Image (cartoon, rainbow, N blue to C red):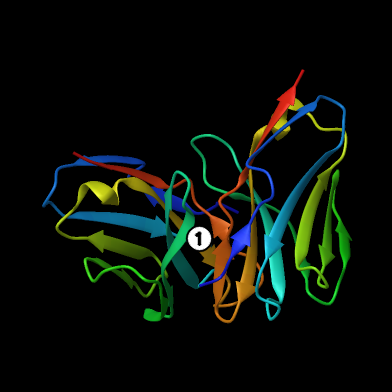
Amino acid sequence: KAGVTQTPRYLIKTRGQQVTLSCSPISGHRSVSWYQQTPGQGLQFLFEYFSETQRNKGNFPGRFSGRQFSNSRSEMNVSTLELGDSALYLCASSLAPRTDTQYFGPGTRLTVL
Amino acid sequence: GESVGLHLPTLSVQEGDNSIINCAYSNSASDYFIWYKQESGKGPQFIIDIRSNMDKRQGQRVTVLLNKTVKHLSLQIAATQPGDSAVYFCAERAGNQFYFGTGTSLTVIP
């Protein structure tokens, strides 16, 4: 069974631009969560989607948004990029919200210049 | 917010020795815990999990111990190999969210 895939793997943007990241969960998994990972900060929860609905949201500004499609694929968007948005963005999938295990993708490395 | 921390940010062990990575958590209501391994340039990889109604669980070369009295979680890796070199995170589930520690970097010395 294929794992979680994320595209693109690397992105370089400039301040003020916007970016869209994509995540395809493991087949059969309907819940997708997004995390931001920066050195020394650990994984910070962004949001979780299930059945095309946002079920939970972390403490990030409204510039960070997401959505989920009927095939469970998810996208997250960051508008008006800031230098501090440079990070590894990880997507994790699970069968359903709050179920046992989240499986992570390889991440998208975003660099904001 | 939740506090999930690791006692040591770095750990070096000789190949063949056993490794122990520790994690403290603060929410006594947390009901599920996971250990992840993250290698450079990759996403976290699930290693082993444990529910709060257990105090020990074993996998292949790995054992997780949970001490709810002192809110402490540990990961033991037997016969550590060079391929075990990575950052290890613990995660706790509290309410409807997972919280992650910043990680311990494990280096295996050949």
Label 1: how many Cα within 10 Å (few below 14, some 14–19, many 20+): many
Residue at 36 percent across and 65 percent down: it is A74
Residue at 73 percent across and 27 percent down: it is B108
- Which quadrant holds the C terminus of chain B? top right
Q: Is the residue A19 above or below the residue A29 in the image?
A: above
Q: Is the residue A100 above or below the residue B35 in the image?
A: below
Q: In terms of depth relative to the viewer, which is nearer, B48 or A94? A: B48
Left or right position of B31 against A60: right
Q: Is the residue B84 above or below the residue A68 in the image?
A: above
Q: Can residue A28 be seen from the camera position used here?
A: no
User: For the view shown, which residue lies furthest in the left direction?
Assistant: A16
**Residue B25 lies in what quarter of the image?**
bottom right
Q: In terms of depth relative to the viewer, which is nearer, A13 or B70? A: B70
Q: In terms of depth relative to the viewer, which is nearer, A92 or B9? A: B9
Residue at 49 percent across and 51 percent down: it is A105
* Disc 1 secondary structure class: strand
Left or right position of B66 against A72: right
Q: Is the residue B32 above or below the residue B81 in the image?
A: below
- Residue A44 place in picture, x, y as percent: 45, 60
For disc 1, the chain is A
**Residue B101 lies in what quarter of the image?**
bottom right
Q: Can residue A60 be seen from the camera position used here?
A: yes
* Amino acid type, label 1: Ala
Left or right position of A46 against B5: left
- Residue A113 place in picture, x, y as percent: 18, 39
- Residue B1 place in picture, x, y as percent: 50, 72
- Residue B50 place in picture, x, y as percent: 78, 66
Q: Which residue is mark 1?
A: A92
Residue at 36 percent across and 47 percent down: it is A87
